[in-house]
Amino acid sequence: MCRHLAWLGRPRTLAELVLEPPSSLLVQSYAPRRQRYGTVNADGWGVGVFTPGRAQPARWRSARPLWGDPSFASVAPVLSSGCVVAAVRSATVGMPLEESAVAPFTDGRWLLSHNGRVDRAVLPPVRDAESTVDSALLAALVFDRGLDALADTVREVATADPGARLNLLAADGTRLLATTWGDTLSALVTADGTALASEPWDDDPRWTDVPDRSLVEVTPDGLTTTSLS
Ligand code: GLN
């Protein structure tokens, strides 16, 4: 399984969000603390950011391990954003190993990461998937149905594939949406903003665990969690 995170709040550097915390996404790429499936996340990494005055997110993805990317480590301290989605990948067996298979995916407006797996055969046909990886097909379906239908889309896919794991994390620059369905997710609400992450990036006691089968919405006004079952 992969590990992902999102931030909505005061602009923070990508180094602060992804590289510097004691159990950062960088550390989670080789030593995750709560990962149930897989041991390392060495099959790529991606970061997507929103910037003021530009509706489209900007992305930087790679098929290499995050720890093997010194150029990103060099620029991350000077890249800031108030809305970020980042992920490190452990490819599901049989899935393509390529940059376009790495989250976050985008439709030009939303960023979306998938932590999990789904049987591609049960997914309705979709156009414009970025890759043949299950997560890209799922992302294209979610974009097609619209993010306001995220809960219904997750329930529909889970019914079609009861073995699916469907932890999704999405952002559009003004809000975050996340689901838990089969894996971990934690939330950190602070005066500066809110983080969602597959696992806490430090031992701050304010991190809370999101129950399985939940829909989480984060806006500048706060965080709400509703049950998906
Ligand atoms: N199934 C996706 C992939 O192969 C995500 C894997 C994961 O969550 N580890 O990339």
Image (cartoon, rainbow, N blue to C red):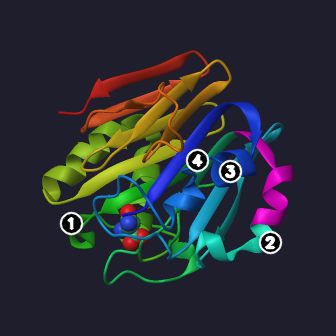
Majority secondary structure in the magenta region: helix
Near-viewer residue (25 or 147) = 25
Mark 1 secondary-structure assignment: helix
Q: Are marks 2 and 1 in contact (CB under 8 Å)?
A: no
Residue 194 belongs to magenta span: no
Q: Are marks 3 and 4 in contact (CB under 8 Å)?
A: no
Residue 75 belongs to magenta span: yes
Tell me the CA gap for discs 1 and 4: 24 Å
Whether ligand 1 has any atom under 8 Å from the Cβ at mark 3 is answered as no
**Mark 3 neighbour class, 10 Å CA radius: few under 14, some 14 to 19, many 20 or more:** some
In the image, 85: left or right of 217? right
Q: Are marks 4 and 2 in contact (CB under 8 Å)?
A: no
Where residue 127 appears, as percent x and y from the top left, is 45, 67
Name the residue type under label 1: Val
Residue 122: mark in rendering: 1
Q: Which residue is mark 4?
A: 110
Q: Which residues are magenta?
A: 73-82
Q: Which residue is mark 3?
A: 20
Where residue 25 appears, as percent x and y from the top left, is 56, 55
Locate the C terminus and report the quarter of the image it occupies: top left
Name the residue at 54% across, 24% down: 189
Disc 2 versus disc 1: nearer the observer: 2
Quadrant of picture, ligand 1: bottom left
